[in-house]
Image (cartoon, coloured by chain):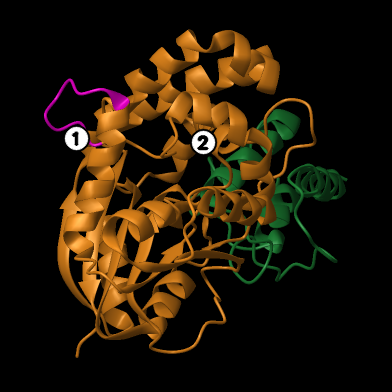
């Protein structure tokens, strides 16, 4: 399923960015208090997702995703 | 900057330890931007002029207790002690920095410049124990900027002064622009570490929040712009030695980073600011 692949892409990205993270729960924030991505890291994640799937929730959605669940929902809906 | 060989790390201490020697050749011994007034002066004079801008704001008198936050290898701390009679404590997260700075002070016979490995955002020093807190181009590597400013305010005596200069962000950068220019931003991160630039006004707001009175806030982007051409000239002059230290890729990355920064300065995305705040008496 696309959503599982999206989760795997996020995990791989976080590992490469040396981010510490536990379980990727839906309500986990991408930013402060969660994965602590800064704007450049969010932009890089956005590009990685687009490379993999052809579209991504950061650059084609109406609003920027705030949580892991919101990123995954984009692919769930797709 | 995660240069070449070793695994990249964005930790300030690892970053500085690894590339220090190459940077000394590029940036000069003062290790920071230059203030090119009058225009056309050499980098060594311009870096001294930037320090002078800080000195004018700090108003350091003989015997003043100065905390140098993010002291690097101790050049400024030693200068404040030797030329201005200050009693300086320099702090840095880098153990190598502390060792180098301690050695520098010893080589100059300076008992009034001491160095300790401490974090400027949680310094563990006593309240009201310094007359001046000095942060020269170190804050951009501290993720917890509020911690830096509140800790600086805490350790100042009433009437004490906080002076800071650093790279600043001059406008909001929309997400899609960050995405579009991510290779440029990633190059800067690779070369300079995990830096986060804030607008001067954000510093002022946070200082006000921690009870400081901001009495000077100056954008000196234009005065610092010639720094990049000066760094490139040093890259060219010392190319062989820099290549030996950080590899041809490291040198190439550095040169490209100066062009990226110069473009950011010119399109008013990034720049340089200096400020002073006083702790109410």
Write the residue at 67% across / 29% down. Answer: B3
Q: Relative to B235, does residue B228 appear above or below in the rendering?
A: below
Asked whether, in this view, residue B46 is left or right of residue B136, the answer is: left
Q: Which residue is mark 1?
A: B223
Q: Main secondary structure of the magenta part?
A: loop
* Chain represented in green: A
Badge 1 density bin: few <14, some 14–19, many ≥20, Cα 10 Å: some
List x then y, in percent, for residue B156.
35, 82
Question: Of the residues tagged 2 and 1, which is closer to the observer?
Answer: 1
One can see residue A56 in this view:
no
- Secondary structure under badge 1? helix
Q: Residue B39 in magenta?
A: yes
Asked whether, in this view, residue B86 is left or right of residue B146, the answer is: left
Q: Which residue is mark 2?
A: B179
Q: Which residues are magenta?
A: B35-43
Quarter containing the C terminus of chain B: bottom left
List x then y, in percent, for residue B270.
33, 40
Q: Colour of chain B?
A: orange
Q: Chain of mark 1?
A: B
| B280 vs B160, nearest the viewer | B160
Which callout, 2 or 1, points at the residue further toward the start of the chain? 2
Write the residue at 70% across / 71% down. Answer: A27
Quarter containing the N terminus of chain B: top right
Q: CA distance from mark 2 to mark 1?
A: 29 Å
> Which residue occupies the extreme front position in the image?
B109
Which quadrant holds residue A17? top right
């Amino acid at each position: 399923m696309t959503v599982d692949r999206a989760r795997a892409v996020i995990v791989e990205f976080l590992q490469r960015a040396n981010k510490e993270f536990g379980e990727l729960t839906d309500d986990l924030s991408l930013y402060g208090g969660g994965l602590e991505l800064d704007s450049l890291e969010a932009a890089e994640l956005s590009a990685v997702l687009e490379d993999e799937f052809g579209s991504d929730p950061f650059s084609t959605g109406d609003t920027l995703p705030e949580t892991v669940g919101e990123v995954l929902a984009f692919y769930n809906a797709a | 900057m995660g240069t070449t060989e070793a695994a990249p790390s964005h930790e300030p201490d690892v970053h500085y330890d690894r590339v220090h020697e190459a940077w000394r050749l590029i940036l000069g011994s003062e290790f920071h931007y230059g203030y090119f007034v009058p225009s056309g002066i050499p980098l060594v004079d311009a870096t001294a002029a930037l320090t002078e801008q800080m000195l004018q704001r700090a108003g350091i008198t003989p015997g003043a207790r100065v905390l140098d936050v993010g002291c690097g290898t101790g050049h400024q701390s030693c200068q404040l002690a030797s030329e201005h009679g200050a009693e300086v404590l320099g702090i840095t997260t880098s153990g190598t920095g502390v060792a180098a700075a301690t050695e520098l002070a010893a080589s100059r016979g300076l008992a009034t410049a001491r160095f300790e490995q401490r974090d400027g955002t949680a310094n563990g020093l006593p309240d009201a124990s310094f007359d001046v807190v000095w942060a020269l181009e170190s804050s951009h590597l501290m993720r917890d900027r509020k911690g830096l400013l509140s800790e600086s305010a805490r350790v100042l005596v009433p009437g004490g002064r906080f002076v800071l200069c650093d790279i600043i962000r001059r406008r909001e950068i929309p997400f899609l622009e960050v995405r579009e220019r991510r290779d440029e931003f990633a190059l800067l991160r690779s070369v300079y570490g995990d830096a986060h630039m804030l607008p001067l006004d954000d510093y002022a707001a946070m200082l006000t929040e921690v009870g400081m009175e901001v009495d000077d806030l100056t954008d000196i982007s234009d005065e610092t712009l010639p720094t990049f051409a000066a760094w490139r000239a040093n890259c060219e002059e010392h190319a062989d030695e820099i290549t030996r230290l950080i590899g041809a890729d490291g040198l190439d990355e550095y040169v490209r980073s100066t062009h990226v920064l110069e473009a950011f300065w010119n399109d008013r995305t990034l720049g340089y600011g200096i400020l002073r705040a006083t702790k109410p008496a």
